[in-house]
Amino acid sequence: MWGYPSQNAMQGATGITRHGGERGDPRGMEPKMKDALTIHRALLEWEAVHEIVRLPFALAHADELPRALGLPPERCLVTRVYSCDGPFGARRFLTGVIVPAEGRPSADAVRAAVGAKTLRPAHPDIVNAVTQYAANLVCPLLLPDDMPVLIDQRVMDALPSDDVVYTATGEASIALGIRARTLYALTHAEPADLTAPKTPHSVS
């Protein structure tokens, strides 16, 4: 269904009946991971029209979205997370990069866009801890405010802004459908030319 799924419908779809998106255990355990219900609640608050989609099989990685949905890769967006070292001994930070499913950005282009000295795929444990999403199923929404996010310019050029794109939600069996222009606006991602050069030095 396209529009605003009801809270009860979302609870049934995700098997979740709890309230509150990111509470931590009062005894000091790790905070709850973000999931489709967390995203759904945020989008309702933002009055953003969206669709929650039950997938026919559980994803091992967001790159499987085209196969699960029967759509071309450019309609299925993957958020890759990289660990960056700042120049001149600046602190290490994470960067999110939104690309079409199965796409890989140029390491040099990402490094230049965020002003990093070095760049490598972030360790899954770090991705889990910082984004609070499963590392292979990161949604580009609700990422930390201090985490730079880039979007491949080719993604924005390839699709009309009213087309619906799909992303992971942190849950293996559920995807998010949302208009491209809405996603671009809510992520505050910076468009960048992330095309790999002819002699590619791309990062996973």
Image (cartoon, helix red, strand yellow):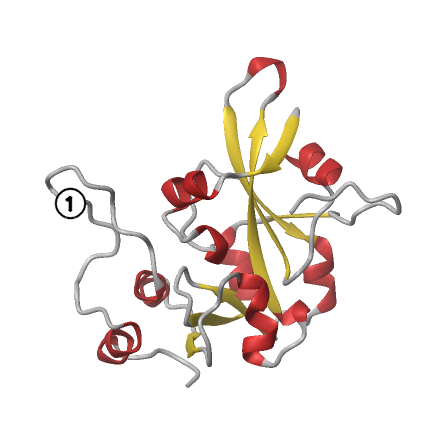
Q: Residue furthest right?
A: 198
Tell which of 149 and 161 is nearer to you: 149
Residue found at the very far top of the displayed protein = 88
Q: Is residue 45 above or below residue 199?
A: below
Q: Position of residue 73 (x, y in %)?
A: 66, 69
Examine the rendered structure and indicate whether residue 85 appears above or below residue 2.
above
Residue depicted at 51% across the width and 25% down the height: 92
Expressed as whole percent of the image width and height from the top left, the position of residue 117 reads 66, 24
What's the residue at 40%, 40% (across, down)? 130
**131 in relation to 35, above or below:** above
Q: Is residue 115 visible?
A: no
- SS label for mark 1: loop
Residue 14 location (% of width, % of height): 29, 72
User: Does residue 12 appear left or right of residue 159 in this picture?
Assistant: left
Residue 156 in view in this figure: yes
- Front-most of 200 and 160? 200
Foreground of the two, 34 or 43: 34
Mark 1 crowd level (few <14, some 14–19, many ≥20, 10 Å Cα): few
